[in-house]
Amino acid sequence: MSDTKKDRVIPILEIVTAAGLILFWIAFSTVGLAPENPPPCYFAYEHAFPLPDICLALLLLAAGVLLLRRSPLGRTLSLIAAGALIFLGLLDFSFNLQNGIYLTSVLDLVLNAFINAWCVAFGAIIIWRNQ
C-alpha cells in the first residue's frame, strides 16, 4: 500500500465511525436496540450518551476531513477523539459487564462487544499511528 493510501485509512475510518455513532442513535431512537429485559438503570444510562456521542461523532468527522486535507489540526483532533473513544469503549464495557448486558442475547453480545472493542481498539490505533 502506498503512503498516500495508508494516510487515508485512519481519516476514512474516523468518518465511518462518526457515521456509525449517528446511525446507532437514530436506530436506538426509532427501531429500539435495547435488550429485551434491560436492567432498571439501563435507559437512564443510555440516555446520558446521545449528546457526548454526537459531539464525538462531530469531532471524528472534523478530524477525518482535516486529515484528508492534510491540516495539522486533524492530528490534534484525532488524538482527542482517540481518548474519547477509549473512554467510551471502556465505560460501556464496564457497564455491560456489571449489568449482564452481554448475557441477554447473542445479538446483544455481538453488537455491544463489537462496539466496545471497536472504540478501544480504534482509539488505541489512532494514538499509535500518531506517534
Image (spheres, grey):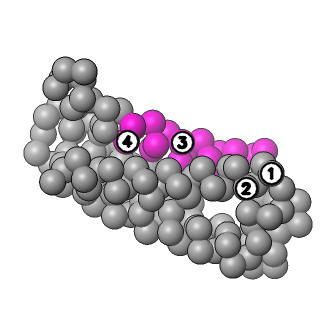
The Cα atoms of the two marked residues, 3 and 1, are separated by 20 Å
Q: For marks 4 and 2, give the one nearer the viewer.
A: 2
In the structure shown, which secondary structural element does the residue marked by tag 3 occupy? helix
The Cα atoms of the two marked residues, 3 and 2, are separated by 18 Å
Q: Which residues are magenta?
A: 13-31
Identify the residue shown where x is 50% and y is 50%. Answer: 118
Return the residue at label 4: 14
Asked if residue 55 can be seen in this view, the reply is no
Identify the residue shown where x is 74% and y is 76%. Answer: 99
Front residue of 125/22: it is 125
In the structure shown, which secondary structural element does the residue marked by tag 1 occupy? helix
Say which amino acid is labelled 2. Leu
- Residue 95, image x and y in percent? 64, 74
- Residue 50, image x and y in percent? 56, 60
Return the residue at label 1: 106
The Cα atoms of the two marked residues, 3 and 4, are separated by 10 Å
Query: Is residue 21 within the magenta segment?
Result: yes
Q: Give whichever of discs 3 and 4 has the lower sequence position.
A: 4
Image disc number at residue 120: none
The Cα atoms of the two marked residues, 4 and 1, are separated by 27 Å
Query: Is residue 24 within the magenta segment?
Result: yes
Image marks 2 and 1: residues in contact by CB distance under 8 Å: yes
Displayed quadrant of residue 93: bottom right
Return the residue at label 3: 20
Say which amino acid is labelled 3. Gly
